[in-house]
Amino acid sequence: MSFRSFLLGRALANRELSDQKIGWLAAVPAMGLDGLGSSSYGPEAALTILIPLGAAGLTAIGWVIAPIVALLAILYLSYRQVVVAYPSNGGAYTVAKQNLGEGAALVAAAALMIDYVLNVAVGISAGVGALTSSLPALHPWTLELCLGVLALVAIANLRGTREAGWLFAAPTYLFIASFLGLVGWGMVRIALDGGQPVAVVAAPPLGAATQTAGLWLLMRAFAAGCTAMTGVEAVSNGVNALKEPVVKQAHRTLTAICLVLGLLLAGIAVVAHGYRLGAMDQTRPDYQSVLSQLAGAVVGHGAIYYAAMASLLAVLCLSANTSFVGFPRLARLVALDEYLPRGFAVADRRLVFSVGVMFLTVTAGVLLVMFGGITDRLIPLFAIGAFLTFTMSQLGMVVHWRRQPGRNLGRLAINALGAGTTIVALTVILAAKFLEGAWLVVLALPATVLLLRGVHRYYAGLDRRLAVAGDFAVEETEPPTVLVAYEERNRMSDRALRFAMTLSPDVLAVHLLRLAGPEQEEDIAAVRARFDAEIAGPLTAAGRSSPRLVLVPAPYREIQGPILELVRKIDEATPGRSVAILIPELVIRHWWERLLHSRRASRLRRALLDHAGARLMVVSSPWRD
């Protein structure tokens, strides 16, 4: 078994695609980790904004989380309808393309791709933040841990969505059970103790208030908390990863994700208020995440605490998996429309769109390095792409229902409500986060759209240049002049000459002189004598046309220039006739062999493809030792 097969698994046949589909139980961890994991950093991001209020921030958190949960419910109903209307990948790109046009579709695609990259960086950094909360000694290694987790998630997804889903199922369902249990028990304690429960492990004291609650501060907290909803669209983007019946599987997956997320958001707000839990600066050595404080306050630092925090760590780190499921599928759709390089639409040996997986890995890794793996530095960039995507999807669905025959007023009203609320939320998020770093996303969006249009323009121009009108015509009847790169007589050169003779009677064996430098002693007469005695002579005696040996000076010790000049002279002498250059090449089987060969053949081929005329053909003659 090769190392690649060990790492990524055996190659899969096309017929095995249906076996790679997943049901809703596996889809919840595969597509819902972003949404579920964001229940930790969404409320924490809101509480971070409320730090200047001191203890009053705990009262304000309810006013921030309540509209977020209400918006989540609206998006849940809206995306149920998206899945019904578009049961094969009905994400914002598809919906916008079919209902709002090319421009809107590209905006949706750009926003979603940017958000997927940010989700990977934020999810992993939040997960590592949870780890360093439990084990402060690891704090100096934050960035290295982030990059290690990123590599792990990428490898799991290169093995396929099905394996990634089941691999991540155990920590996902442990997280759901742990934190629903902790939140539930915390709320019971709050009720039994008259709203003043005694924490098992007291949370760090809240700072003194430095300002009073105002509308602008609450808007900023709402904008930060909206990061908790960034994974809602993942199900509609990944429908083609689900088993039949896909609509039923998608609805179950969406319901499970949104229900758990809504319960956690509301419960965390209640327990944080009751136990007086606030946010802390993540760069502090004694940093404790809000959920770490919550678990310690409710059950202490025992086995339950460490099991819950381990599941939180896993879910947050693996929440990047939602993007690894959605991004390659979105990129495939965009590439099929020729707005991304075509490689994004090609399935690899594991039926995975690995170009998308690798692109996502590299770009998220760059972000993590740029921001040091610190969640608070990445949060201001987050959620804008997601809410712009929500808006485009909902507006597209409004147009969709208006075009449908019959009465669809109820469905239209749901998506219209979704469009209206997400527009308001997007406006608030933009206003609140713009100066905190969101301006980077605002600049990145049009730049990405321009890049997508540039790719499409290139492919359109290429297709135009390659287009043929009319019937097939034979414009050349003469065989080409065939040049064979000839260094010395050996098995490679013999094989190349034999093949050249099947293409044309006019074959030139081109030998370049003194390629090694002026001190090279080369017996030109011996080279010609051996060629005549061993190649030309026997062929002529047998009545066959023989290749001709052409000796070409190489005064600057490079092969491209002299051969290109020879091709130019042949073109002038035989206008309208093609020239084919046949290059013998040794097949390199091991990496270390590359160090032992000059790679002249590949350099010659590249130069000929870049600089030769329109009638030149380049042929490789590989020799496998």
Image (cartoon, grey):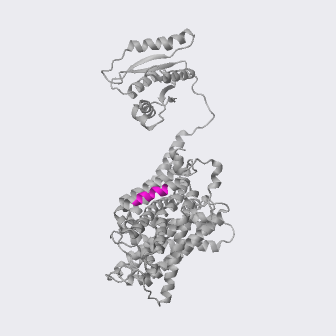
| Residue at image coords 43%, 61% | 121
Which residue in the rendered view is the most extreme toward the right? 406
- Figure check: 330 above or below 200: above
Q: Relative to 24, is 442 on the left or the right?
A: left
Give residue 540's quadrant in the image.
top right
- Figure check: 171 above or below 585: below
Q: What x and y, as percent, mark residue 518?
A: 30, 21
Which residue in the rendered view is the most extreme toward the top? 541
| Residue at image coords 53%, 72% | 176
| Magenta segment, prevailing SS (helix, strand or loop) | helix
Camera-nearest residue between 346 and 436? 346
Residue 146 colored in magenta in the image: yes
- Figure check: 1 above or below 559: below
Q: What x and y, as percent, mark residue 550?
A: 43, 17
- Magenta region, residue range: 145-154
Q: Can residue 427 be seen at all in this image of the molecule? A: no
Residue 470 colored in magenta in the image: no
- Figure check: 399 above or below 354: below
Camera-nearest residue between 266 and 70? 266
| Residue at image coords 45%, 16% | 549
Q: What x and y, as percent, mark residue 329?
A: 55, 56
Q: What x and y, as percent, mark residue 552?
A: 39, 20
Instruction: State which quarter of the image contains the N terminus.
Output: top right
Give residue 520's quadrant in the image.
top left
The number of numbered discs placed on residues in the rendered structure image is: 0
Camera-nearest residue between 598 and 115? 598
Which residue in the rendered view is the most extreme toward the bottom? 194
Camera-nearest residue between 506 and 272? 272
Q: Can residue 213 be seen at all in this image of the molecule? A: yes
